[in-house]
Image (tube, helix red, strand yellow):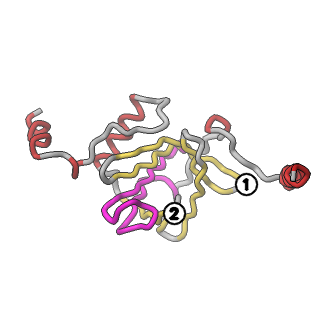
Amino acid sequence: MMKKWMLTTAALALAGCAQINSYQDAVQTPAPASLQGTWQTVGPQSGLRSDRALGSLIVNADGSTLDCRQWMRVIAKPGKLTLLSGDYVNVNRQSRVMPLELNGGELRYDGLTLRKVERPTVECQQALDEVAKQPNAAVIQNIEPEIMKSAITQANENKQ
């Protein structure tokens, strides 16, 4: 068993397979114009927990990214765009590597199909603001989705 594992490892090394072992190892790559912008799911997707959930990927010109999922709560994961074996991938701060596949006007990403939209949702914009305040955070989870806010909370926010 050990010999098989060692042979497999050696074969992969000789084949020149590239991999990213940590977020710090990934070199941030500027995004091509075709990938820049805010991408969002349209309609129900099997990669999301609910038919009402939204998934977004924000790709900035400098290659910084934000994977933002929202439904009952908001989970936003900062990351960066990098090239791996000639293909663009998003690497989040938890060192998860997810390929990006652009096909016409649709982006396939992490089991989702996204389309470019004009601007992020209110919650994803708040997550972007939080990333600036918490530059080393792997996950931003302190944003309450609008659909979960009570009438009292919304009235108090409107007074401010």
Q: Residue furthest front?
A: 1
Q: Position of residue 21 (x, y in %)?
A: 69, 41
Q: Is residue 140 above or below residue 86?
A: above
Quarter of the figure with the C terminus: top left
* Left-right relation of 18 to 144: right
Which residue is at 10% across, 46% downward? 151
Q: Quadrant of residue 93?
A: top right
Q: Does residue 48 belong to the magenta stretch?
A: yes
> Mainly helix, strand or loop, the magenta region?
loop
Q: Position of residue 52 (x, y in %)?
A: 30, 62
Q: Quadrant of residue 54?
A: bottom left
Q: Residue furthest bottom?
A: 104
Which residue is at 32% across, 47% downward? 73
Q: Nearer the viewer, residue 34 or 10?
A: 10
Task: Please name the amino acid that badge 2 sits on.
Answer: Gly
Task: Please name the amino acid that badge 1 sits on.
Answer: Ser
Name the residue beneath numbered marker 2. Answer: 111
Which residue is at 57% across, 63% downward? 101
Query: Which label is found at residue 47?
Result: none
Name the residue beneath numbered marker 1. Answer: 85
* Left-right relation of 55 to 144: right
Q: Nearer the viewer, mark 2 or mark 1?
A: 2
Mark found first going from the N terminus, 2 or 1: 1
Which residue is at 83% across, 53% downward? 12
Element on which disc 1 rests: loop
Element on which disc 2 rests: loop
Q: Residues within 10 Å of mark 1 (few under 14, many from 20)?
A: few
Q: Does residue 110 belong to the magenta stretch?
A: no
Q: Position of residue 105 (x, y in %)?
A: 47, 68
Start and end of the magenta stretch? 35-63
